[in-house]
Amino acid sequence: MRKTLLGLLGTVALLSGLASPALAFEPVNVVHTEKVQAGPYDLTVGFSTWPVKAMQSLDFTFAPEDGIAGKTGTLTMIWDGKEQDDDPLARHPRKRDVWGLDIQALPEPGTWTFRFDINGPAGAATGELRNLQVMEQPGPPMGLSWAISTLPLFGLIALIVIAWRRTRTTVNP
Amino acid sequence: MDITATTTPATVAVPRGVVPASLVLGGTLISLIGLTWDIQWHSDVGPDTFFTLPHLFLYAGSAISGLASLVVVLMTTADAKRGRPVDPIVGGRAVGVFGRTFAAPVGYLISGIGAALFLVYGLWDQWWHGLYGFDAVIASPPHIGLLLSISITMVGTVMIFSVASDQTWGTYGVVGSAAVLLAFSTVTVLGLQAMPRSIVNSVNVGTAFLMVMILFMAAHALNRRGGAIVVAVAVAALQAVFWWFSPWATEVYADATGLPLRDYTDGVPALPNMIPMSLIIVAVAVELLHKLPAWLPGAVGGVIVTACAPLQRILTYGGSFPSADRYVATIVAGAAFGAAAGMLGRRFGHMLRHLAPAKEGRHA
């Protein structure tokens, strides 16, 4: 029993040790930028991959020309004329000097709009990045991906059916 | 050499089957800990790789359950090949796998298959992240495949303990393994988010279905008055511990890796908050209405879970109440699915009781 416990503790220690050096988080590499004018604020929108494809995650950065200090704001994402998301502009976790979204995917292909409502020393203003074209998702169709991924559920249902049939004659509620 | 399994008076007798069953249950608990931690990590901190500590808990959980299952299957196979009697208290009756190549106790066969599937879906998930990036979405196809695989291991664990449900360790094990399965299922059900949006909140209805079904199943497998309440209390205990653990572990790990917490984190423990706090009320209703046909307390349970879900969300996150038509439609669907879950759960409980070996053949 003691050996088993020591073995388990050793495994946990080994796993913890392995986890630390493996935590090499990717830096934010902006490969494409777009400019947005929100009243007095010049905003640069950065993308870590370009072109953007549906479901493929990337880093977005939103950088006012004179920094984010003293400013707050809201990002509203609009697709097909409908608001999809409405969140305060937060610092990018891996690039804290700008606002951003880390490893986030736009779920649908088509035309997206990012609306920025910014409050700062020069007052409140709104600007939009319009006509952001998002291409079709890469990879297999979602129906196929879901079919592959729900196989365990169908296996479980098959098991239940077998067990049900084998215990049917002995039901005694 | 003739080896006879006898208990010497000088040693403390551990009931046969307890050690591997505990290892499999421990593995599933580690998976659950890894999941609650991982979800909180993505919510409060963010960056992801394949080898974060919460991910390693998820992998280790399935590895422990899978290896314990494999060892039991190999030992049972060795016993069967040598013509030794196989005690069905260890995971249930042995069934032939690949013809008669392996003799696998049915509970360990299921838990082991779940762990093996986890490996396969881990590769599928790795490929997925290579193509789509490390977007932290629970309801992606490979993630649901992984969660379903772990759920199969958890179902196997419930089976393993149900075999010994008339012994003390078996009873505790059924309560513990059912509580772990129930808590875990509140995340798996998020796969329903992929369904087209309708007037019914499919995740709340799915949650009601699974909660009622697992509660009925465990209560009927235990075959004791108060069984449903004991399972609900065990779930509430997990919920309470994770309510503290998830944000705490996330913050400690973020500090250790030098990463900051996100701006505007809501501070709500994500997985614990997915577990319906109304479950204890459902359990009381199940106990009070136990003489009625299962569909009736099942429907009541479905109504309680779906009616209380928005209240819990508003209590923890704030926000607005759903529209009246959506709220009522969800409750009606909850009643229908709850009724089905009650009947299915009771039947599954009967199936679990059927796993226990006949008393005259017992070598406890």
Image (cartoon, coloured by chain):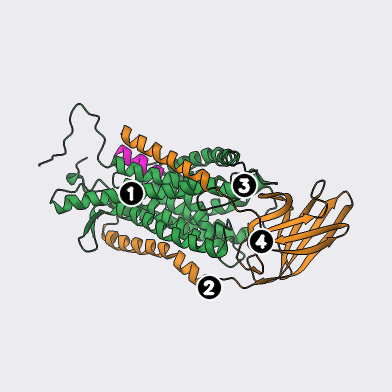
Find the magenta span and give its range: B167-179
- Nearer the observer, B22 or B229: B22
CA separation in Å, label 2 and label 4: 24 Å
Mark 3 neighbour density, 10 Å: few (under 14) some (14–19) many (20 or more):
many
Badge 3 element = loop
Helix, strand or loop at label 2? It is loop
Kind of residue sitting beneath label 2: Pro
Q: Quadrant of the C terminus of chain B?
A: top left
Residue marked by disc 2: A141
Say which residue label 3 marks.
B45
Q: Residue under circle 4?
A: A48
Q: Chain of mark 3?
A: B
Of all chains, the one bearing label 2 is A
Q: Which chain corresponds to the colour green?
A: B
Nearest to N terminus: mark 2 or mark 4: 4
Callout 2: 10 Å neighbours few (<14), some, many (20+)?
A: few
Horizontal side, residue A55 vs residue B61: left or right: right
The orange-tinted chain is A
Which numbered disc, 3 or 1, marks the residue that appears first in the sequence? 3
* Residue identifier under label 1: B67
